[in-house]
Image (cartoon, rainbow, N blue to C red):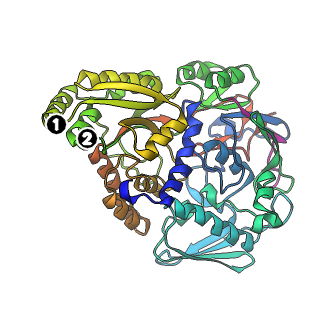
Amino acid sequence: MGSRRTSNVRTVSLLVLVAIAFLVAGCGGGGASSGVNRTTGDEAATEPEHGGTLSVSLGEEILSVNPLKAYSAEDVNVVSQMFETLFKEDYEGKVVPWLLESYKSSKNDTVWTLQLKNGVDFSTGKPMTSADVKWSLDHGREVETVAGVVAGWESVEATSPTTVVITTKQPSPEMPEILSAWSFSVMPANWGGESEKQFDEHPIGTGPFEFAGRKKGESLTLRKNPNYWVPQRPYLDEVVYHTVQNPESRTAQIRGGQLDMAYDPPFPELESLEQSPELAVEAPYLGVGWLMILNTENPLFENKKAREAVNIALDRESMVELSLHGHGEPMNAYLLPWIPGYDKSLVAAEHNPEKAKKLLAEAVQEGVKPTFTISSMSEDPFWTQASQIAQANLEEVGFTVTIKKSDLSSLLGQLESREFDATTIYNTALSPYPAELFSFYNATGGFFTGVDTKRTEALMAAAQSETNTAKRNAMWGQIQRIINEEQALILVAYSPYVWVRQSDVTGSFVGRTGILWLGETGFAS
């Protein structure tokens, strides 16, 4: 970050990095977005029965049920059952209208006219209007502008009771993807006539469920929204989210039937879970990227030869096999494989210890000392074992490496203050929009590596307003190549989101960003 740091950068760091907390207790990673599809395969044709309570564990405790304050995957999972967005993910993973009858854009994608769906009510029974949508978009854009995702919005106007018009200063070709983000959830204007604090205590949305109550540190309960606008939905009467931080405990509870669905079982358990006739495992997308951050303000990693030596010393295949039990693959690009603009032509760094030894020897001749410490989260699902492999790989080529275990708050403090040599971390996305990850990379000085981000900032700004999809994706690809060439953010492995459910749970759907959509979920009759 260096001299480019601002208060906004600090805000971005907090908003995105707080999402790391959800991974500490689990092993798969994930994000949040909404889905409207049911489970694919034979179960998709199974009509659930009405009624029942679904017991779920996401791992960590849900901290906020306000869409504007939902920063962790747990929060967004729950928010997405109570609130809905104008666009949503469909059966094939495409972003399509949801709370809209139709939409159209001007020729240059600077004016977006949105026709709202008729008959949509909030959980209070009050109809959704364009005034509610305008108010929600105005507040959502404040959050996303700070994060660098939304740029150049000129106005949001409610031109009729059922019409909203968004005008931007430059083309915004990815507006549907932007408006599918949970920050743009539709809420009643002015918090439904209450204070924001009151709204936080009993939120009001248009989703299939409404807030029922919570037991701090234990559980949060949602109940069926009696005014839901989709006929005969939802099937379930209640959903109870249990706080079960330990992944082994979650796995034991789903094996024992105390949980109907659970997130992030330990990777070593997946094979036996998949073989159980009472259970089903869903891992549809590679949604997590495991990374190592090299601090280029450290004299050792200011030297690019030393950075490259680290990169090619790592045996990614062994890490995937031993840490993920084969459930993943070496990471080749900063974007996750499901995100539009992902450059699949990029190749993961090849394990080459002989070349790494040569490069490090040259770096040492240039005056660097090949000794450093890797800070790693305690009980991290991937890096707990992978960091030991990394240490052995790096010492084989001539580095002297110490592994230092840190809790989450300490690790975040080190990143913010740049008081670290190297850090293990992960990457995930909360919306189907490349700018989310790239804006974080730029705002934090190259994901806290300290590299100059002028080129990636310029490319991102150009890509966001490029109306030609092929040209836009080429720009996203160029940013990914720059990150690979810097070799300061070391890309290590991808792993999938993982959900486990009882076999009698049907109609569940996990979208590309890992959310569990429960609007069509129920128990098989």
When the figure is inspected, residue 519 is found, relative to residue 191, above or below; the finding is: above
Circle 1 SS class: loop
When the figure is inspected, residue 52 is found, relative to residue 401, above or below; the finding is: below
Task: Using the rendered image of the protein, determine whether residue 395 is visible from the camera's viewpoint.
Answer: yes
Residue 259 figure quarter: top right
Task: Using the rendered image of the protein, determine whether residue 512 is visible from the camera's viewpoint.
Answer: no
Circle 2 SS class: helix
Q: Residue at x 86, y 60 (%)?
A: 124
Residue 271 % position (x, y): 55, 20
Marks 2/1 in contact by CB < 8 Å: the verdict is yes
When the figure is inspected, residue 250 is found, relative to residue 8, above or below; the finding is: above
Residue 478 % position (x, y): 31, 56
Residue 307 % position (x, y): 26, 38
Mark found first going from the N terminus, 2 or 1 = 2
Residue 203 figure quarter: bottom right
Left or right of residue 307: residue 169 = right
Q: Residue at x 39, y 59 (%)?
A: 4
The magenta span reads 231-244
Residue nearest the viewer, comparing 371 with 238 = 371
Furthest-bottom residue in this view: 159
Question: Mark 2 — residue?
Answer: 299
Residue nearest the viewer, comparing 397 with 239 = 397
Amino acid type for the residue under numbered disc 1: Gly
Q: Quadrant of the C terminus?
A: top right
Amino acid type for the residue under numbered disc 2: Pro
Residue 506: say if magenta. Answer: no
Q: Residues within 10 Å of mark 2 (few under 14, many from 20)?
A: some
How far apart, in angstroms, are the residues tagged by discs 2 and 1?
Answer: 9 Å
Residue 3 % position (x, y): 37, 58
Q: Residue at x 16, y 36 (%)?
A: 367
Q: Residues within 10 Å of mark 1 (few under 14, many from 20)?
A: few
Residue 367 has which mark? 1
